Image (cartoon, coloured by chain):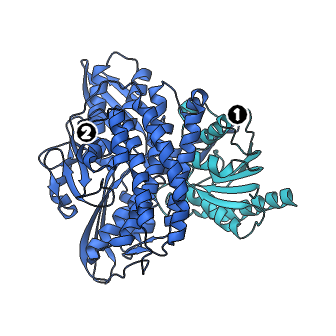
Protein backbone atom coordinates (compact mmCIF):
# COMPACT_ATOMS: atom_id res chain seq x y z
CA UNK A 1 0.00 0.00 0.00
CA UNK A 2 1.25 3.47 -0.85
CA UNK A 3 1.63 5.07 2.54
CA UNK A 4 0.57 8.59 1.60
CA UNK A 5 -3.00 9.27 0.51
CA UNK A 6 -4.38 12.54 -0.83
CA UNK A 7 -8.16 12.80 -0.45
CA UNK A 8 -10.18 15.47 -2.19
CA UNK A 9 -13.61 15.91 -0.60
CA UNK A 10 -16.57 18.01 -1.57
CA UNK A 11 -19.40 18.38 -4.03
CA UNK A 12 -18.65 19.52 -7.56
CA UNK A 13 -22.21 20.79 -7.99
CA UNK A 14 -21.89 23.27 -5.13
CA UNK A 15 -19.58 25.72 -6.87
CA UNK A 16 -16.43 26.21 -4.75
CA UNK A 17 -17.21 23.11 -2.70
CA UNK A 18 -15.76 21.32 -5.73
CA UNK A 19 -12.27 22.71 -5.05
CA UNK A 20 -11.14 19.61 -3.13
CA UNK A 21 -11.91 17.40 -6.12
CA UNK A 22 -10.40 19.87 -8.58
CA UNK A 23 -7.14 19.99 -6.62
CA UNK A 24 -7.01 16.21 -6.17
CA UNK A 25 -7.66 15.59 -9.86
CA UNK A 26 -4.80 17.89 -10.79
CA UNK A 27 -2.50 16.13 -8.33
CA UNK A 28 -3.26 12.70 -9.82
CA UNK A 29 -0.80 13.30 -12.64
CA UNK A 30 1.78 15.06 -10.51
CA UNK A 31 2.57 12.91 -7.49
CA UNK A 32 3.59 9.34 -8.06
CA UNK A 33 4.35 8.72 -4.39
CA UNK A 34 0.80 9.17 -3.17
CA UNK A 35 -2.56 7.60 -3.92
CA UNK A 36 -5.15 10.23 -4.84
CA UNK A 37 -8.84 9.66 -4.06
CA UNK A 38 -12.02 11.68 -4.59
CA UNK A 39 -14.56 11.27 -1.79
CA UNK A 40 -17.71 13.00 -0.62
CA UNK A 41 -16.67 13.39 3.02
CA UNK A 42 -18.77 10.55 4.44
CA UNK A 43 -16.88 9.53 7.61
CA UNK A 44 -16.62 5.76 7.17
CA UNK A 45 -15.24 6.21 3.67
CA UNK A 46 -12.64 8.64 4.99
CA UNK A 47 -11.65 6.11 7.66
CA UNK A 48 -11.38 3.33 5.07
CA UNK A 49 -9.31 5.59 2.84
CA UNK A 50 -6.73 6.64 5.41
CA UNK A 51 -6.51 3.60 7.73
CA UNK A 52 -2.96 2.30 7.91
CA UNK A 53 -1.38 5.21 6.00
CA UNK A 54 1.63 7.13 7.21
CA UNK A 55 0.08 10.40 6.11
CA UNK A 56 -3.31 11.52 4.82
CA UNK A 57 -3.73 14.90 3.18
CA UNK A 58 -7.33 16.06 2.93
CA UNK A 59 -8.27 18.80 0.45
CA UNK A 60 -11.50 20.70 0.97
CA UNK A 61 -13.18 24.07 0.88
CA UNK A 62 -12.47 25.61 4.30
CA UNK A 63 -14.36 28.54 5.70
CA UNK A 64 -12.12 30.52 8.02
CA UNK A 65 -13.24 34.08 7.42
CA UNK A 66 -10.24 35.20 5.36
CA UNK A 67 -10.67 36.52 1.81
CA UNK A 68 -11.86 34.00 -0.82
CA UNK A 69 -8.96 32.07 -2.26
CA UNK A 70 -6.93 32.06 0.99
CA UNK A 71 -5.12 28.74 1.38
CA UNK A 72 -5.14 27.16 4.84
CA UNK A 73 -2.97 24.34 6.10
CA UNK A 74 -3.97 22.64 9.33
CA UNK A 75 -2.12 19.72 10.92
CA UNK A 76 -4.52 17.57 12.79
CA UNK A 77 -3.05 15.34 15.47
CA UNK A 78 -5.04 12.18 15.73
CA UNK A 79 -4.32 10.72 19.14
CA UNK A 80 -5.65 12.00 21.41
CA UNK A 81 -8.45 13.80 19.60
CA UNK A 82 -7.39 17.44 19.29
CA UNK A 83 -9.07 19.80 21.68
CA UNK A 84 -9.92 22.17 18.86
CA UNK A 85 -12.33 19.69 17.36
CA UNK A 86 -15.85 20.40 18.45
CA UNK A 87 -17.59 17.70 20.39
CA UNK A 88 -19.18 15.14 18.17
CA UNK A 89 -22.67 15.68 19.41
CA UNK A 90 -22.92 18.85 17.39
CA UNK A 91 -21.45 17.48 14.15
CA UNK A 92 -21.67 13.79 13.50
CA UNK A 93 -20.97 13.92 9.82
CA UNK A 94 -17.71 14.87 8.25
CA UNK A 95 -14.09 15.11 9.01
CA UNK A 96 -14.16 15.31 12.77
CA UNK A 97 -16.51 12.32 12.93
CA UNK A 98 -14.10 10.41 10.77
CA UNK A 99 -11.21 11.31 13.06
CA UNK A 100 -13.18 10.27 16.13
CA UNK A 101 -14.32 7.03 14.53
CA UNK A 102 -10.80 6.25 13.33
CA UNK A 103 -9.50 6.87 16.81
CA UNK A 104 -12.13 4.63 18.44
CA UNK A 105 -11.22 1.82 16.05
CA UNK A 106 -7.46 2.47 15.83
CA UNK A 107 -7.75 3.31 12.16
CA UNK A 108 -6.36 6.82 11.90
CA UNK A 109 -3.32 7.62 9.77
CA UNK A 110 0.03 8.47 11.30
CA UNK A 111 -0.47 12.10 10.33
CA UNK A 112 -3.39 14.07 9.00
CA UNK A 113 -3.08 17.41 7.22
CA UNK A 114 -6.05 19.41 5.98
CA UNK A 115 -5.48 21.84 3.14
CA UNK A 116 -8.28 24.17 2.24
CA UNK A 117 -9.24 27.16 0.22
CA UNK A 118 -11.61 29.82 1.46
CA UNK A 119 -14.65 29.65 -0.84
CA UNK A 120 -16.44 32.62 -2.37
CA UNK A 121 -19.56 30.80 -3.48
CA UNK A 122 -21.18 27.59 -2.23
CA UNK A 123 -24.48 27.85 -4.05
CA UNK A 124 -25.81 25.21 -6.46
CA UNK A 125 -23.76 25.30 -9.61
CA UNK A 126 -20.93 23.69 -11.49
CA UNK A 127 -17.55 25.39 -11.63
CA UNK A 128 -15.28 27.41 -9.33
CA UNK A 129 -15.36 31.12 -8.62
CA UNK A 130 -12.63 33.34 -10.05
CA UNK A 131 -10.93 33.82 -6.67
CA UNK A 132 -10.73 30.09 -6.01
CA UNK A 133 -9.73 29.31 -9.57
CA UNK A 134 -6.80 31.74 -9.25
CA UNK A 135 -5.67 30.27 -5.93
CA UNK A 136 -5.93 26.64 -7.03
CA UNK A 137 -2.47 26.34 -8.70
CA UNK A 138 -0.82 27.59 -5.49
CA UNK A 139 -2.63 24.99 -3.41
CA UNK A 140 -1.74 22.22 -5.83
CA UNK A 141 1.90 23.26 -5.86
CA UNK A 142 2.07 23.41 -2.07
CA UNK A 143 0.57 19.93 -1.66
CA UNK A 144 2.80 18.43 -4.35
CA UNK A 145 5.88 19.95 -2.70
CA UNK A 146 4.88 18.60 0.70
CA UNK A 147 4.46 15.08 -0.69
CA UNK A 148 7.73 15.30 -2.62
CA UNK A 149 9.72 16.50 0.38
CA UNK A 150 8.22 13.74 2.50
CA UNK A 151 8.97 11.01 -0.01
CA UNK A 152 12.38 12.30 -1.10
CA UNK B 1 -16.91 22.10 3.00
CA UNK B 2 -15.14 22.65 6.28
CA UNK B 3 -15.37 25.59 8.63
CA UNK B 4 -12.29 27.06 10.22
CA UNK B 5 -13.13 29.47 12.98
CA UNK B 6 -10.76 32.10 14.25
CA UNK B 7 -8.76 32.67 16.31
CA UNK B 8 -8.28 29.03 17.35
CA UNK B 9 -7.88 26.59 14.50
CA UNK B 10 -11.21 24.96 14.92
CA UNK B 11 -12.60 22.80 12.17
CA UNK B 12 -16.22 21.93 11.87
CA UNK B 13 -17.72 20.39 8.79
CA UNK B 14 -20.98 21.70 7.48
CA UNK B 15 -22.19 18.58 5.77
CA UNK B 16 -25.68 20.00 5.85
CA UNK B 17 -24.69 23.02 3.81
CA UNK B 18 -22.82 20.78 1.44
CA UNK B 19 -25.48 18.44 0.25
CA UNK B 20 -28.97 18.52 1.46
CA UNK B 21 -30.00 21.96 2.55
CA UNK B 22 -30.60 23.10 6.06
CA UNK B 23 -31.67 20.94 8.97
CA UNK B 24 -34.10 23.24 10.68
CA UNK B 25 -37.38 22.62 12.42
CA UNK B 26 -39.84 25.21 13.61
CA UNK B 27 -42.66 24.33 15.94
CA UNK B 28 -45.44 26.69 16.91
CA UNK B 29 -47.37 25.81 20.03
CA UNK B 30 -50.50 27.79 20.80
CA UNK B 31 -52.37 27.35 24.06
CA UNK B 32 -50.63 24.02 24.69
CA UNK B 33 -51.38 22.57 21.27
CA UNK B 34 -49.07 22.10 18.27
CA UNK B 35 -50.25 24.55 15.68
CA UNK B 36 -47.58 24.23 13.03
CA UNK B 37 -44.52 22.10 12.35
CA UNK B 38 -42.17 23.08 9.61
CA UNK B 39 -39.19 20.96 8.83
CA UNK B 40 -36.48 21.89 6.37
CA UNK B 41 -34.52 18.72 5.97
CA UNK B 42 -34.24 18.30 2.29
CA UNK B 43 -33.69 20.56 -0.62
CA UNK B 44 -35.41 18.88 -3.55
CA UNK B 45 -33.04 18.66 -6.50
CA UNK B 46 -34.59 21.62 -8.32
CA UNK B 47 -31.15 22.84 -9.35
CA UNK B 48 -30.48 19.56 -11.13
CA UNK B 49 -33.83 19.64 -12.90
CA UNK B 50 -32.92 23.03 -14.35
CA UNK B 51 -29.32 22.02 -15.01
CA UNK B 52 -30.49 19.01 -17.07
CA UNK B 53 -32.72 20.97 -19.40
CA UNK B 54 -30.97 21.49 -22.73
CA UNK B 55 -28.54 18.61 -22.15
CA UNK B 56 -28.34 15.34 -24.06
CA UNK B 57 -30.48 12.32 -23.14
CA UNK B 58 -27.27 10.47 -22.27
CA UNK B 59 -26.22 12.85 -19.49
CA UNK B 60 -28.68 12.36 -16.57
CA UNK B 61 -27.16 9.09 -15.28
CA UNK B 62 -23.84 10.82 -14.61
CA UNK B 63 -25.21 14.18 -13.52
CA UNK B 64 -27.99 12.98 -11.20
CA UNK B 65 -25.58 10.52 -9.53
CA UNK B 66 -24.05 13.63 -7.96
CA UNK B 67 -27.24 14.54 -6.11
CA UNK B 68 -26.52 12.09 -3.30
CA UNK B 69 -23.20 10.61 -2.22
CA UNK B 70 -24.99 7.74 -0.50
CA UNK B 71 -27.39 6.66 -3.22
CA UNK B 72 -25.88 7.57 -6.61
CA UNK B 73 -26.95 4.21 -8.07
CA UNK B 74 -30.59 4.92 -7.26
CA UNK B 75 -30.41 8.20 -9.18
CA UNK B 76 -28.65 6.51 -12.08
CA UNK B 77 -31.16 3.67 -12.25
CA UNK B 78 -34.26 5.88 -12.09
CA UNK B 79 -32.70 8.22 -14.68
CA UNK B 80 -31.78 5.38 -17.05
CA UNK B 81 -35.17 3.74 -16.78
CA UNK B 82 -37.03 7.01 -17.37
CA UNK B 83 -34.96 7.87 -20.45
CA UNK B 84 -35.24 4.33 -21.78
CA UNK B 85 -39.00 4.59 -21.32
CA UNK B 86 -38.97 7.80 -23.37
CA UNK B 87 -36.94 6.09 -26.09
CA UNK B 88 -38.90 2.83 -26.04
CA UNK B 89 -35.88 0.81 -24.93
CA UNK B 90 -36.28 -2.31 -22.74
CA UNK B 91 -33.21 -3.47 -20.82
CA UNK B 92 -33.72 -7.08 -19.85
CA UNK B 93 -31.80 -10.31 -19.29
CA UNK B 94 -28.28 -10.17 -17.88
CA UNK B 95 -28.00 -6.41 -18.27
CA UNK B 96 -31.01 -6.02 -16.00
CA UNK B 97 -29.47 -8.54 -13.59
CA UNK B 98 -26.25 -6.52 -13.48
CA UNK B 99 -28.23 -3.41 -12.67
CA UNK B 100 -29.91 -5.24 -9.81
CA UNK B 101 -26.53 -6.45 -8.58
CA UNK B 102 -25.16 -2.91 -8.67
CA UNK B 103 -28.22 -1.73 -6.76
CA UNK B 104 -27.70 -4.53 -4.19
CA UNK B 105 -24.27 -3.04 -3.46
CA UNK B 106 -25.84 0.34 -2.79
CA UNK B 107 -28.52 -1.10 -0.52
CA UNK B 108 -25.87 -2.93 1.51
CA UNK B 109 -23.78 0.20 1.89
CA UNK B 110 -26.61 2.60 2.62
CA UNK B 111 -28.54 0.32 4.98
CA UNK B 112 -25.47 -0.69 6.98
CA UNK B 113 -24.52 2.96 7.33
CA UNK B 114 -27.96 3.97 8.53
CA UNK B 115 -28.41 1.02 10.87
CA UNK B 116 -25.09 1.37 12.69
CA UNK B 117 -23.95 4.94 12.32
CA UNK B 118 -27.26 6.77 12.57
CA UNK B 119 -30.05 4.66 14.03
CA UNK B 120 -28.51 2.14 16.43
CA UNK B 121 -26.89 4.72 18.76
CA UNK B 122 -30.42 6.05 19.48
CA UNK B 123 -31.48 2.71 20.93
CA UNK B 124 -28.65 2.84 23.47
CA UNK B 125 -29.10 6.52 24.26
CA UNK B 126 -25.74 7.27 22.66
CA UNK B 127 -24.70 10.26 20.59
CA UNK B 128 -22.87 8.48 17.80
CA UNK B 129 -21.30 5.32 16.44
CA UNK B 130 -18.07 6.44 18.10
CA UNK B 131 -19.76 5.98 21.47
CA UNK B 132 -21.29 2.73 20.20
CA UNK B 133 -17.78 1.48 19.44
CA UNK B 134 -17.01 2.07 23.10
CA UNK B 135 -19.64 -0.42 24.25
CA UNK B 136 -19.78 -2.79 21.25
CA UNK B 137 -16.70 -2.41 19.12
CA UNK B 138 -17.21 -5.72 17.24
CA UNK B 139 -20.59 -4.48 15.97
CA UNK B 140 -19.02 -1.32 14.56
CA UNK B 141 -16.08 -3.25 13.07
CA UNK B 142 -18.55 -5.66 11.47
CA UNK B 143 -20.53 -2.75 10.08
CA UNK B 144 -17.44 -1.26 8.44
CA UNK B 145 -16.52 -4.64 6.95
CA UNK B 146 -20.04 -5.20 5.62
CA UNK B 147 -20.32 -1.70 4.24
CA UNK B 148 -16.99 -2.11 2.52
CA UNK B 149 -18.25 -5.20 0.68
CA UNK B 150 -21.21 -3.17 -0.58
CA UNK B 151 -18.76 -0.52 -1.67
CA UNK B 152 -16.59 -3.04 -3.51
CA UNK B 153 -19.62 -4.50 -5.26
CA UNK B 154 -20.51 -1.02 -6.56
CA UNK B 155 -16.91 -0.60 -7.73
CA UNK B 156 -16.95 -3.96 -9.48
CA UNK B 157 -20.08 -3.21 -11.53
CA UNK B 158 -20.11 0.59 -11.48
CA UNK B 159 -16.41 1.22 -11.96
CA UNK B 160 -16.23 3.57 -9.00
CA UNK B 161 -17.97 3.64 -5.63
CA UNK B 162 -18.74 7.28 -5.01
CA UNK B 163 -20.14 8.29 -8.38
CA UNK B 164 -20.22 5.16 -10.53
CA UNK B 165 -19.03 5.94 -14.05
CA UNK B 166 -19.84 2.69 -15.82
CA UNK B 167 -23.62 3.22 -16.03
CA UNK B 168 -25.25 4.50 -19.22
CA UNK B 169 -28.60 4.59 -20.92
CA UNK B 170 -29.15 1.09 -22.34
CA UNK B 171 -26.84 -0.70 -19.88
CA UNK B 172 -23.15 -0.27 -19.14
CA UNK B 173 -19.97 0.88 -20.86
CA UNK B 174 -18.29 -2.37 -19.87
CA UNK B 175 -19.65 -5.52 -18.26
CA UNK B 176 -17.73 -7.70 -15.79
CA UNK B 177 -16.56 -11.14 -16.81
CA UNK B 178 -18.08 -14.22 -15.22
CA UNK B 179 -14.71 -14.90 -13.62
CA UNK B 180 -14.75 -11.47 -11.95
CA UNK B 181 -18.19 -12.03 -10.47
CA UNK B 182 -17.41 -15.57 -9.30
CA UNK B 183 -14.24 -14.25 -7.63
CA UNK B 184 -16.46 -11.88 -5.63
CA UNK B 185 -18.66 -14.72 -4.31
CA UNK B 186 -16.66 -15.42 -1.11
CA UNK B 187 -17.06 -11.79 -0.09
CA UNK B 188 -20.82 -12.00 -0.52
CA UNK B 189 -20.88 -15.23 1.49
CA UNK B 190 -19.00 -13.49 4.28
CA UNK B 191 -21.39 -10.56 3.98
CA UNK B 192 -24.35 -12.93 4.32
CA UNK B 193 -23.00 -14.27 7.62
CA UNK B 194 -22.43 -10.77 8.94
CA UNK B 195 -25.84 -9.54 7.79
CA UNK B 196 -27.55 -12.44 9.57
CA UNK B 197 -25.78 -11.39 12.77
CA UNK B 198 -26.97 -7.82 12.26
CA UNK B 199 -30.59 -9.01 11.99
CA UNK B 200 -30.17 -10.84 15.31
CA UNK B 201 -28.60 -7.77 16.93
CA UNK B 202 -31.26 -5.27 15.89
CA UNK B 203 -34.11 -7.76 16.21
CA UNK B 204 -33.35 -7.97 19.93
CA UNK B 205 -33.62 -4.24 20.64
CA UNK B 206 -36.35 -2.69 22.76
CA UNK B 207 -38.71 -0.72 20.56
CA UNK B 208 -40.75 2.21 21.81
CA UNK B 209 -44.45 1.80 21.07
CA UNK B 210 -45.43 3.86 18.05
CA UNK B 211 -47.74 3.13 15.14
CA UNK B 212 -47.99 5.36 12.09
CA UNK B 213 -51.15 5.43 10.02
CA UNK B 214 -49.79 6.76 6.74
CA UNK B 215 -50.67 5.01 3.50
CA UNK B 216 -47.59 3.03 2.52
CA UNK B 217 -46.29 3.14 -1.05
CA UNK B 218 -43.69 0.90 -2.69
CA UNK B 219 -42.88 -0.79 -5.97
CA UNK B 220 -44.15 -4.34 -6.37
CA UNK B 221 -42.72 -6.87 -8.79
CA UNK B 222 -44.36 -10.18 -9.79
CA UNK B 223 -41.49 -12.29 -8.46
CA UNK B 224 -38.87 -10.12 -6.78
CA UNK B 225 -38.68 -7.94 -3.68
CA UNK B 226 -38.86 -4.93 -5.98
CA UNK B 227 -35.84 -2.66 -6.28
CA UNK B 228 -35.29 -1.83 -9.93
CA UNK B 229 -38.81 -1.89 -11.36
CA UNK B 230 -42.42 -2.85 -10.76
CA UNK B 231 -45.85 -1.35 -10.33
CA UNK B 232 -46.33 1.46 -7.84
CA UNK B 233 -48.62 0.02 -5.17
CA UNK B 234 -49.92 0.93 -1.74
CA UNK B 235 -51.68 -0.70 1.18
CA UNK B 236 -54.57 1.63 0.36
CA UNK B 237 -55.21 -0.11 -2.94
CA UNK B 238 -53.07 1.97 -5.30
CA UNK B 239 -51.77 -0.17 -8.17
CA UNK B 240 -50.45 1.87 -11.09
CA UNK B 241 -47.66 1.96 -13.64
CA UNK B 242 -44.77 4.41 -13.37
CA UNK B 243 -46.31 6.29 -16.28
CA UNK B 244 -49.41 6.96 -14.18
CA UNK B 245 -47.43 8.53 -11.32
CA UNK B 246 -48.24 12.16 -12.25
CA UNK B 247 -51.97 11.39 -12.31
CA UNK B 248 -51.94 10.03 -8.77
CA UNK B 249 -49.32 12.07 -6.91
CA UNK B 250 -49.38 15.81 -6.47
CA UNK B 251 -47.61 18.50 -4.45
CA UNK B 252 -50.04 20.28 -2.10
CA UNK B 253 -50.20 22.27 1.09
CA UNK B 254 -50.86 20.25 4.22
CA UNK B 255 -52.52 21.37 7.40
CA UNK B 256 -49.68 21.92 9.86
CA UNK B 257 -46.96 23.11 7.48
CA UNK B 258 -46.30 25.94 5.07
CA UNK B 259 -44.12 23.82 2.74
CA UNK B 260 -45.51 22.00 -0.28
CA UNK B 261 -45.78 18.26 0.24
CA UNK B 262 -46.09 15.29 -2.04
CA UNK B 263 -49.54 13.74 -1.57
CA UNK B 264 -51.58 10.98 -3.09
CA UNK B 265 -54.23 12.89 -4.98
CA UNK B 266 -57.46 13.19 -2.98
CA UNK B 267 -56.07 10.87 -0.29
CA UNK B 268 -53.18 12.63 1.43
CA UNK B 269 -49.95 11.83 3.21
CA UNK B 270 -48.05 8.69 2.41
CA UNK B 271 -44.86 6.95 3.40
CA UNK B 272 -42.18 5.36 1.22
CA UNK B 273 -39.16 3.38 2.39
CA UNK B 274 -38.42 0.16 4.24
CA UNK B 275 -41.64 -0.09 6.27
CA UNK B 276 -43.72 0.38 3.12
CA UNK B 277 -41.64 -2.08 1.12
CA UNK B 278 -41.79 -4.70 3.80
CA UNK B 279 -45.50 -4.28 4.30
CA UNK B 280 -46.19 -4.70 0.59
CA UNK B 281 -43.50 -7.18 -0.40
CA UNK B 282 -42.50 -9.41 2.51
CA UNK B 283 -43.90 -12.37 0.54
CA UNK B 284 -41.21 -11.74 -2.08
CA UNK B 285 -38.22 -12.08 0.26
CA UNK B 286 -35.67 -14.84 -0.24
CA UNK B 287 -36.13 -17.78 2.13
CA UNK B 288 -33.00 -16.85 4.06
CA UNK B 289 -34.24 -13.30 4.70
CA UNK B 290 -37.83 -14.39 5.44
CA UNK B 291 -36.59 -16.95 7.98
CA UNK B 292 -34.36 -14.37 9.66
CA UNK B 293 -37.27 -11.92 9.83
CA UNK B 294 -39.52 -14.62 11.29
CA UNK B 295 -36.92 -15.50 13.90
CA UNK B 296 -36.93 -11.94 15.27
CA UNK B 297 -40.70 -11.57 15.06
CA UNK B 298 -40.89 -9.03 12.26
CA UNK B 299 -44.37 -9.27 10.78
CA UNK B 300 -45.72 -7.69 7.60
CA UNK B 301 -48.26 -5.61 9.54
CA UNK B 302 -45.44 -3.66 11.22
CA UNK B 303 -46.22 0.08 11.33
CA UNK B 304 -43.67 1.08 13.97
CA UNK B 305 -41.00 3.33 12.41
CA UNK B 306 -38.50 2.39 15.14
CA UNK B 307 -38.64 -1.16 13.77
CA UNK B 308 -37.53 0.07 10.37
CA UNK B 309 -34.03 -0.72 11.63
CA UNK B 310 -35.00 -4.42 11.60
CA UNK B 311 -36.49 -4.11 8.12
CA UNK B 312 -33.24 -2.55 6.87
CA UNK B 313 -31.25 -5.41 8.37
CA UNK B 314 -33.57 -8.01 6.77
CA UNK B 315 -33.39 -6.18 3.45
CA UNK B 316 -29.59 -6.15 3.67
CA UNK B 317 -29.57 -9.91 4.14
CA UNK B 318 -32.08 -10.29 1.30
CA UNK B 319 -30.09 -8.30 -1.26
CA UNK B 320 -26.94 -10.25 -0.41
CA UNK B 321 -28.83 -13.49 -1.07
CA UNK B 322 -30.23 -12.02 -4.28
CA UNK B 323 -26.73 -10.89 -5.25
CA UNK B 324 -25.37 -14.42 -4.75
CA UNK B 325 -28.09 -15.81 -7.03
CA UNK B 326 -27.31 -13.22 -9.71
CA UNK B 327 -23.60 -14.06 -9.52
CA UNK B 328 -24.32 -17.80 -9.81
CA UNK B 329 -26.56 -17.39 -12.85
CA UNK B 330 -24.42 -14.76 -14.57
CA UNK B 331 -23.70 -15.22 -18.22
CA UNK B 332 -21.72 -12.37 -19.75
CA UNK B 333 -24.00 -10.51 -22.17
CA UNK B 334 -22.97 -10.19 -25.83
CA UNK B 335 -23.19 -6.43 -25.71
CA UNK B 336 -22.60 -4.14 -22.71
CA UNK B 337 -25.52 -1.94 -23.68
CA UNK B 338 -28.44 -1.62 -26.06
CA UNK B 339 -28.38 1.19 -28.60
CA UNK B 340 -31.19 3.70 -28.42
CA UNK B 341 -33.00 5.19 -31.37
CA UNK B 342 -33.27 8.86 -30.58
CA UNK B 343 -36.65 10.49 -30.78
CA UNK B 344 -39.08 12.73 -28.99
CA UNK B 345 -41.04 11.42 -26.02
CA UNK B 346 -41.70 11.50 -22.31
CA UNK B 347 -40.49 8.70 -20.04
CA UNK B 348 -41.00 7.76 -16.40
CA UNK B 349 -38.74 5.73 -14.13
CA UNK B 350 -39.32 4.70 -10.53
CA UNK B 351 -36.94 2.55 -8.51
CA UNK B 352 -36.53 1.80 -4.81
CA UNK B 353 -33.69 3.89 -3.44
CA UNK B 354 -32.59 2.59 -0.02
CA UNK B 355 -34.79 5.24 1.62
CA UNK B 356 -37.78 4.74 -0.69
CA UNK B 357 -39.35 5.38 -4.05
CA UNK B 358 -37.32 7.62 -6.37
CA UNK B 359 -39.21 8.91 -9.41
CA UNK B 360 -37.71 10.59 -12.50
CA UNK B 361 -39.47 11.94 -15.57
CA UNK B 362 -37.80 13.31 -18.72
CA UNK B 363 -39.24 14.84 -21.84
CA UNK B 364 -36.95 14.64 -24.85
CA UNK B 365 -37.14 16.59 -28.08
CA UNK B 366 -36.65 14.77 -31.37
CA UNK B 367 -32.89 15.41 -31.35
CA UNK B 368 -32.48 13.76 -27.93
CA UNK B 369 -32.18 17.01 -25.98
CA UNK B 370 -33.90 17.19 -22.58
CA UNK B 371 -36.81 19.63 -22.70
CA UNK B 372 -38.02 18.91 -19.16
CA UNK B 373 -36.82 16.96 -16.11
CA UNK B 374 -38.64 16.10 -12.89
CA UNK B 375 -36.95 14.35 -9.96
CA UNK B 376 -38.95 13.39 -6.87
CA UNK B 377 -36.72 11.82 -4.19
CA UNK B 378 -38.00 9.69 -1.32
CA UNK B 379 -37.16 12.21 1.38
CA UNK B 380 -39.35 14.87 -0.15
CA UNK B 381 -42.16 12.34 -0.59
CA UNK B 382 -41.84 11.46 3.11
CA UNK B 383 -41.69 15.06 4.25
CA UNK B 384 -45.38 15.26 5.14
CA UNK B 385 -45.32 11.92 6.95
CA UNK B 386 -42.24 12.93 8.93
CA UNK B 387 -43.79 16.28 9.87
CA UNK B 388 -46.95 14.48 10.90
CA UNK B 389 -44.94 12.14 13.15
CA UNK B 390 -43.14 15.16 14.59
CA UNK B 391 -46.37 16.99 15.31
CA UNK B 392 -47.64 13.94 17.20
CA UNK B 393 -44.34 13.55 19.04
CA UNK B 394 -44.24 17.19 20.12
CA UNK B 395 -47.91 17.12 21.17
CA UNK B 396 -47.31 14.02 23.30
CA UNK B 397 -44.19 15.52 24.88
CA UNK B 398 -45.17 19.16 25.06
CA UNK B 399 -43.87 19.57 28.62
CA UNK B 400 -40.25 18.74 27.75
CA UNK B 401 -37.69 21.53 27.55
CA UNK B 402 -36.48 22.53 24.09
CA UNK B 403 -33.25 20.52 24.25
CA UNK B 404 -35.00 17.26 25.14
CA UNK B 405 -37.64 18.02 22.55
CA UNK B 406 -34.91 18.51 19.94
CA UNK B 407 -33.31 15.15 20.77
CA UNK B 408 -36.64 13.35 20.57
CA UNK B 409 -37.47 15.07 17.31
CA UNK B 410 -34.15 13.99 15.82
CA UNK B 411 -34.87 10.38 16.73
CA UNK B 412 -38.32 10.68 15.16
CA UNK B 413 -36.75 11.95 11.94
CA UNK B 414 -33.96 9.37 11.92
CA UNK B 415 -36.53 6.57 11.96
CA UNK B 416 -37.28 7.50 8.36
CA UNK B 417 -33.65 7.65 7.20
CA UNK B 418 -33.67 10.94 5.42
CA UNK B 419 -30.51 11.71 3.52
CA UNK B 420 -27.33 11.17 5.47
CA UNK B 421 -26.37 14.61 6.60
CA UNK B 422 -29.84 15.27 7.88
CA UNK B 423 -30.01 12.08 9.82
CA UNK B 424 -27.18 12.91 12.16
CA UNK B 425 -27.25 15.39 15.02
CA UNK B 426 -28.35 18.35 13.10
CA UNK B 427 -31.53 19.93 14.14
CA UNK B 428 -31.76 23.65 14.67
CA UNK B 429 -35.02 23.75 16.61
CA UNK B 430 -37.12 26.85 17.11
CA UNK B 431 -40.08 26.53 19.45
CA UNK B 432 -42.55 29.38 19.60
CA UNK B 433 -44.92 29.03 22.54
CA UNK B 434 -47.80 31.45 22.80
Q: Nearer the viewer, residue B363 or B288?
A: B288
Q: Residue at x 44, y 63 (%)?
A: B328
Q: Is residue B255 left or right of residue B226?
A: left
In x, y percent, where is residue A28? Answer: 69, 67
- Quadrant of image for the C terminus of chain A: bottom right
Q: Quadrant of residue B216?
A: top left
For this orientation, the residue located farthest to the top is B399
- Quadrant of image for the N terminus of chain A: bottom right
* Tag of residue B116: none
Q: Which chain is mark 1 on?
A: A
Q: Is residue A39 visible?
A: yes
Name the residue carrying label 1.
A81
Residue B309 lies, with reference to residue A71, above or below; the image says above
Q: Which chain is blue?
A: B
Q: Quadrant of residue B222?
A: bottom left
Q: Are marks 2 and 1 in contact (CB under 8 Å)?
A: no
In x, y percent, where is residue A127? Answer: 54, 65
In x, y percent, where is residue B49? Answer: 35, 63
Q: Colour of chain A?
A: cyan
- Select label 2 or label 1 by which is in front: 2
In x, y percent, where is residue A73? Answer: 73, 49
Q: Nearer the viewer, residue B218 or A124?
A: B218
**Element assignment for label 2:** loop
Name the residue carrying label 2.
B300
**Element assignment for label 1:** loop
Give the distance between the C-alpha atoms of the residues marked 2 and 1, in whole angstroms.
Answer: 45 Å
Q: Nearer the viewer, residue B246 or B157?
A: B157
Amino acid sequence: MIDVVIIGIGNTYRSDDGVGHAAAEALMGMVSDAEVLLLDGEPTRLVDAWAGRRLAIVLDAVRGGDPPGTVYRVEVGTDPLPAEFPHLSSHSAGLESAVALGRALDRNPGGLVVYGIEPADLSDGHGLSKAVELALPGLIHQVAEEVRSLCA
Amino acid sequence: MTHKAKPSRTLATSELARVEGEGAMRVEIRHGRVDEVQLNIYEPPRFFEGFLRGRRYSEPPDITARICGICPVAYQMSACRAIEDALGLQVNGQLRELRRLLYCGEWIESHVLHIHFLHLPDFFGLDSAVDLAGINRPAVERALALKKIGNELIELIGGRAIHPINVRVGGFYKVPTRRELVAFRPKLEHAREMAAEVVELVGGLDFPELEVEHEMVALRHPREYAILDGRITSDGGLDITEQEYPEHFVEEHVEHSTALHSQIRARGTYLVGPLARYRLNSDRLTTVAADAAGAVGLTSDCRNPFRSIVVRAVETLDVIEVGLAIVDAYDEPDRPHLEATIGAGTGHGATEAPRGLLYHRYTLSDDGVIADAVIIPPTSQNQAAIEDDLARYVQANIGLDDEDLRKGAEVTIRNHDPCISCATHFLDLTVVRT
